[in-house]
C-alpha cells in the first residue's frame, strides 16, 4: 500500500498541445526594487549631469551636485519604498483579518460567493460546489482563496520586510546612479575636457541603462531587445530634455554666472 501511495499517476491534460514551456519571469524578493530604483537613479543622475553640462559648469560642480543629489534622492526613494511597503503590508493584514472574520461568522455566505465565482470562471455548478465544500474544511485556505478572488487571484507577499525594501532601494539607487558620474572620475587623469567627460557619462549611462533594461525584461518576462530599447529611449529623452532646459536657461534666458 505504501508503494502505491508513492507512485500515484495523475493524468493531467496538456495545454497548447504539449508545446515548449514558456520561460518564467525572473524571481527574487528584492529584484523589483533593485531594477526600478536602478533605472530611476541612472535617468535622474544623467539628467542632472546633462543640465549642468549644458550650463557649462565645471567637472567639480558636476561631481559635487551629482553626488549630493544622488544621496538625497536615494534617501527619499528608500524611505518612500519603506512607507509604501509598510502601508501595503498593514492593509493586507487588515484585509485578511476581515476575510477571516467573514469566513468564521458568515461561512455559508462566503462559500456561496465562491461557488458563484468559480461558475463565472467556467467551472460547472457541481464541481464548484464540491471544491468549495472541500475548502470549507480548511478555514485558513478558504480565507486565502477568498482574498485571492477579491484581488483577481493575486495575493500579497506576507513575508516582505518593509525596512529591507527601503534599504535595498536606497543602495540600488546610489550604486546605479553613480554610473554616469564615474566617467568624470575615471577620465580625470586623461583629460581636462568637460565635453569629453560628458560624452563618457553618456556612454556609461547608456551601458548601465542597457544592462538594467535586460534585467527588467528578465524580471517581467519581456522581450530583451524591446525592453533595452525602451530604457535607452527613456534615458535619451530625459537627458535631452534636461540638456535643452540647461542650455536655454543659460543662453536664451540669460541666467549666467
Image (tube, rainbow, N blue to C red):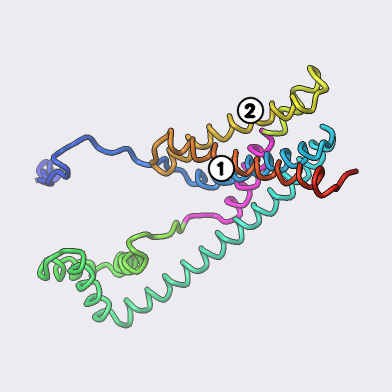
Which residue has dot 2 on it? 203
Which residue has dot 1 on it? 234
Please identify the quadrant where the C terminus is shown. top right
Tag 2, which secondary structure? Answer: helix
- In the image, 193 versus 250, the foreground residue is 250
Residue at the far top: name it: 190
The answer to whether one can see residue 171 in this image is no
Q: Residue at horizontal 69%, vertical 27%?
A: 199
Tally the numbered discs. 2
Quarter of the figure with residue 38: top right
- In the image, 164 versus 140, the foreground residue is 164
- Above or below, 54 relative to 113: above
C-alpha gap between disc 1 and disc 2: 15 Å
The answer to whether one can see residue 151 in this image is yes
Residue 54 lies, in percent from the top left, at 76, 38
Q: Residue at horizontal 14%, vertical 68%?
A: 130
- Above or below, 235 relative to 159: above
Tag 1, which secondary structure? Answer: helix
Residue 160 counted in the magenta span? yes
Q: What residue span does the magenta drawing correspond to? A: 159-179
- Above or below, 58 relative to 131: above
Amino acid at each position: 500500500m505504501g508503494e502505491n501511495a508513492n507512485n500515484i499517476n495523475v493524468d493531467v491534460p496538456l495545454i497548447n498541445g504539449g508545446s515548449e514551456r514558456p520561460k518564467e519571469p525572473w524571481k527574487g524578493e528584492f529584484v523589483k526594487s533593485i531594477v526600478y530604483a536602478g533605472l530611476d537613479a541612472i535617468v535622474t543622475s544623467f539628467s542632472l549631469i546633462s543640465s549642468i553640462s549644458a550650463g557649462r559648469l565645471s567637472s567639480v560642480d558636476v561631481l559635487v551636485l551629482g553626488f549630493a543629489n544622488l544621496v538625497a534622492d536615494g534617501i527619499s526613494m528608500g524611505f518612500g519604498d519603506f512607507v509604501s511597503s509598510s502601508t501595503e503590508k498593514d492593509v493586507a493584514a487588515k484585509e485578511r483579518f476581515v476575510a477571516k472574520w467573514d469566513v468564521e461568522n458568515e461561512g455559508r455566505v462566503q462559500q456561496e460567493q465562491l461557488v458563484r465565482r468559480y461558475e463565472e470562471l467556467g467551472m460547472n455548478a457541481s464541481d464548484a460546489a464540491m471544491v468549495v465544500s472541500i475548502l470549507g474544511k480548511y478555514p485558513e485556505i478558504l480565507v486565502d482563496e477568498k482574498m485571492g478572488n477579491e484581488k483577481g487571484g493575486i495575493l500579497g507577499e506576507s513575508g516582505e520586510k518593509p525596512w529591507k525594501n527601503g534599504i535595498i532601494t536606497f543602495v540600488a539607487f546610489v550604486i546605479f546612479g553613480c554610473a554616469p558620474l564615474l566617467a568624470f572620475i575615471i577620465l580625470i587623469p586623461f583629460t581636462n575636457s568637460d565635453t569629453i567627460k560628458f560624452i563618457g557619462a553618456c556612454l556609461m549611462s547608456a551601458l548601465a541603462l542597457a544592462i538594467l533594461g535586460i534585467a527588467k525584461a528578465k524580471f517581467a518576462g519581456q522581450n530583451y531587445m524591446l525592453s533595452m530599447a525602451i530604457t535607452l529611449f527613456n534615458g535619451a529623452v530625459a537627458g535631452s530634455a534636461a540638456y535643452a532646459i540647461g542650455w536655454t536657461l543659460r543662453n536664451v534666458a540669460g541666467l549666467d554666472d
